[in-house]
Amino acid sequence: MEQLQLLQWVLFPVILVSLVLSVVYSFRARRSTDARKRGLNAARMNISMGVMLLFISIIQLFMSDESTLKIVIGAVFMVIGLFNLFAGLRTLGAIRATDRG
């Protein structure tokens, strides 16, 4: 039981930080007039949101009481989080590659 509480105390701040970063990057992306900066901030927002959803899914899967609904919700969050993370990383890499070449 103590390990689960420790896990919650470690994962919860990561979720909060990634939530704040998602909101900040979202506002920056929407308010930017430069297309490159808008793309960079949108990619960072996707990465932050992906990390947040992954950690929410980890909490949902490991803290569940073997409830099928909680496991399904955790799995859905994990898939969406992975998609956001990889989409953000791919976009960030593409933008940086155009800067080099």
Image: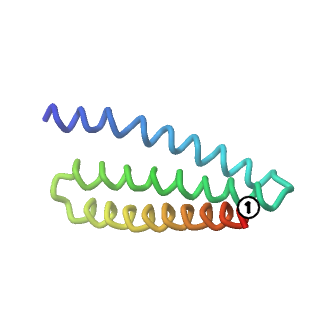
Whether residue 4 sits left or right of residue 42 in the image: it is left
Whether residue 96 sits left or right of residue 70 in the image: it is right
Where is residue 90, by image quadrant?
bottom right
x and y percent of residue 4 in the render? 20, 38
- Secondary structure of residue under mark 1: helix
| Residue 27 versus residue 4 in the image, above or below | below
State the residue at coordinates (50%, 38%): 17
x and y percent of residue 22 in the render? 59, 48
x and y percent of residue 63 in the render? 23, 48
Where is residue 91, by image quadrant?
bottom right
Residue located farthest toward the left when viewing the structure as drawn: 1
The N terminus: image quadrant:
top left
Q: Please name the colour scheme applied to the rendered image.
A: rainbow
Where is residue 88, by image quadrant?
bottom right
66, 99: nearer the viewer: 99
| Residue 9 versus residue 58 in the image, above or below | above
Q: Pointer 1: residues within 10 angstroms few (<14), some, or many (20+)?
A: few
64, 30: nearer the viewer: 30
Q: Which amino acid does label 1 sit on?
A: Asp
Residue of label 1? 99
Residue located farthest toward the front when viewing the structure as drawn: 101
x and y percent of residue 57 in the render? 34, 55
State the residue at coordinates (39%, 62%): 77
State the residue at coordinates (66%, 60%): 96
